[in-house]
Amino acid sequence: MDGDILKIYIGCDHRGLDLKVKLINYLKENGLDVEDIGIENTLLDDYPKFAFKLGEMVRNNNGSLGILICGSGVGMSIAANKVKGIRCVRAVSVDDAFKGKNHNGANVIALGSEVTTDFNLVKEIIDTFINTKAPCEERHLKRVQAIKDYEEGNKWK
């Protein structure tokens, strides 16, 4: 795994708790600096608070990445993408993880604990996300910059 990652933040709602624990153990076993975002889970917890907090932590810690888990990964990705500076990909495949980071500059990945139930596949998805380099091709850089510009209030050109 890539040793250049400053830190990996991880958070989940109640539907992702088991997968989060497995992933924390897996990532730590591979020598990565992983931090649970520290919000307690309850049966009535709301995914946006996890996504917003993790998004802010990733945004405020340059070079870090985030992992969010809910039942489908959809709600977490929508909420995380509302945090300025966050580009979250909902990934159900290795290709999603690769393209999300390499083409779109994703710094957060959202997983669905009830969608991707094969832990070996989850590990492949996460390994790919962590080890894939950020965009470097001009066409991808241009598109990511357009997203950043729009986020800053500049009109689409």
Image (spheres, rainbow, N blue to C red):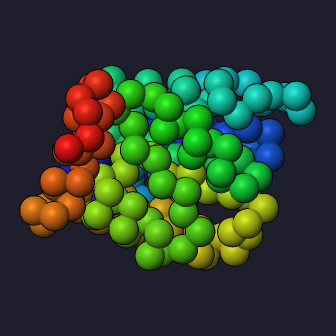
Q: What residue sits 37% from the left and 69% below the top?
A: 98
> Is the residue 130 above or below the residue 150 in the image?
below
Can residue 23 be seen here?
Answer: no
Can residue 149 be seen here?
Answer: yes
Describe residue 141's horizontal placement relative to residue 41 as left or right.
Answer: left
Identity of the residue furthest to the left in this view: 138
Query: 3 or 124, which lies in front?
Result: 124
Describe residue 98's horizontal placement relative to residue 146 as left or right.
Answer: right
- Find residue 128 and report its horizontal and vertical position in percent: 39, 68
Quadrant in which the C terminus is drawn: top left
Q: What residue sits 66% from the left and 30% below the top?
A: 48
Q: What residue sits 54% from the left and 63% below the top?
A: 91
Describe residue 144's horizontal placement relative to residue 13 as left or right.
Answer: left
> Is the residue 31 above or below the residue 1 in the image?
above
- Find residue 130 and report its horizontal and vertical position in percent: 36, 58
Q: How many marks?
A: 0
Describe residue 35's horizontal placement relative to residue 68 as left or right.
Answer: left
- Find residue 12 and report its horizontal and vertical position in percent: 67, 40
Q: What residue sits 30% from the left and 52% below the top?
A: 105
Query: 84 or 146, which lies in front?
Result: 146
Residue 132: image quadrant is bottom left
Identity of the residue furthest to the right in this view: 43
Quadrant in which the N terminus is drawn: bottom left
- Find residue 156 and report its horizontal and vertical position in percent: 26, 40
Residue 103: image quadrant is bottom left
